Amino acid sequence: MTMREAGLFALVAALIVGTGIVQGWNSALLILNMGLVSAVMALGLNLQWGFAGLFNVGVMGFVALGGLAVVLVSMPPVPEAWSAGGLRAMAGLALGAGVIVGAVALWRRLPAGRIRGLGMTAWVVAGFFVYRAVMAPAVGAIEDVNPAVSGYLGGFGLPVLLAWPVGALLAAGAAWVIGKTALGLRADYLAIATLGISEIVIAVLKNEDWLSRGVKNVNGLPRPVPNEIDLQASPDFVARAAEWGLDPVTASTLYVKAGYSLLLAAVLVVVLVLAQMALRSPWGRMMRAIRDNEVAASAMGKNVTARHLQIFVIGSAVCGLAGAMMTTLDGQLTPTSYQPLRYTFLIWVMVIVGGSGNNFGSVLGGMLVWFLWVQVEPMGQWLLGVVTAPLPDGSALKDHLLAGAAQMRLLTMGVVLLLVLRFSPRGLMPER
């Protein structure tokens, strides 16, 4: 790492420490934790775009699947819902999967022509109606079980940390299905396909209450760190907080957030080390050769489509891992919060600003852009307050400017992106 690159990381560290001094360490740790999660997301996207040139704008869908994994793995099951229709719902899902497998088998076995088209249509239509006949009553029965509190099947009640690799596996499975159908498309069509499928994933989370409670959200997710209330009730912790010169409430909040910081940082280090090993390996050099010239790589005997599928699955798995980490950190699954602006555009800005193709650049971009995303609004409020101070109270211009402070983050992201593209087109830490 060069002195310039080390200086950029030192700048980000100084910004976070400065936030702790000025605004409090709770705010600083909150920014740090989400910055670590954002860095993992940026690494996943960098594997796809920086290593292989795959234009994936479906990041939001893979992040959401990681969040769903936390619910499915760690939440306790709802016995009443399982009794009402759980087994029938599982049978419906198995039937749906069977219809898909049968359709693929028919497509491969029947000769091309009118017979295959008619056979496929008849099979799919009949399978759909049978699937609905089994699934619809089961879903209705599950969602009618105390919908204000549950109305869904729940999960397996396992430790929440197990949900993180499961989130990666869920996202990898979805990426494999998408890749098998879409990776043969041109870059712009691939972007449209990934965006559309990610929107389908979000629509499922919002509407299938039996699976994720939909817009009613899943609250109270298990945590891998102690609860603040439990710490405040511990005489040993209260005594230790007094030694630190802190009240128990503040000390417990800082303790929990610092625990999350250590856990998230450990995951980020592992992912970063693996990504660096992949980048420097013969496999990494092959991926970059395919990225730079697919025709030449194909002429050298490389299976371009298979390698694209491989890197697409790996990068999506990392995004799913980050989604599980973020949902665990939030303590709840909120399907309506998965917005393209935050989980697609912002992650792309992180990769571009940091430097696509450079893993350390993705980490830097994730931390820096997330800091700006959080801090620009209060800074903009303060700046506009200073600028409009000479204006009289009740001035239409003053009210308009102060009300627009919330949009400063959007303006700032655009300005940052333009400046980087103008003065450092390959990012703050370009690929070597």
Image (cartoon, rainbow, N blue to C red):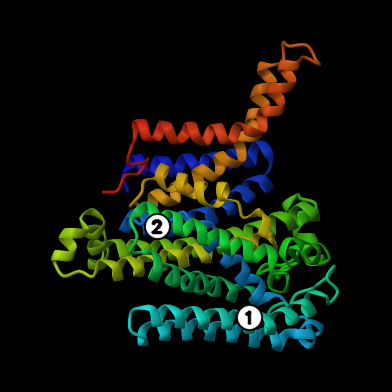
Residue 24's image quarter? top right
The answer to which of 244 and 415 lies nearer the viewer is: 415
| Image location (x, y in percent) of residue 186 | 33, 56
Q: Secondary structure at mark 2?
A: helix
Does residue 407 sit above or below 34 in this rendering?
A: above
Badge 2: few (under 14), some or many (20 or more) residues near its Cα, within 10 Å? many
Name the one closer to the observer, 325 or 30.
Answer: 325
> Which residue is rendered at x = 68% and y = 73% of the image?
211
Q: Is residue 388 above or below residue 126?
A: above
Q: Nearer the viewer, residue 257 or 305?
A: 305
* Residue at disc 1, secondary structure: helix
Q: Residue furthest left?
A: 300
Number of the label disc, if any, that sits on residue 394: none
Residue 417 found in image quarter: top left
Picture disc at residue 129: 1
Q: Residue at x 18, y 59 (%)?
A: 295
Q: Amino acid at mark 1?
A: Phe
Mark closer to the observer (2, 1) = 1
Is residue 265 at least partly visible in the picture?
no
Mark 2 lies on residue:
190
Among the two numbered marks 2 and 1 on one chain, the one whose residue lies closer to the N terminus: 1
Alpha carbon separation for disc pair 2 and 1: 31 Å
Q: Is residue 11 left or right of residue 386?
A: left
Tell me residue 273's x, y (percent). Answer: 38, 63
- Residue that appears at 53% across and 60% down: 198
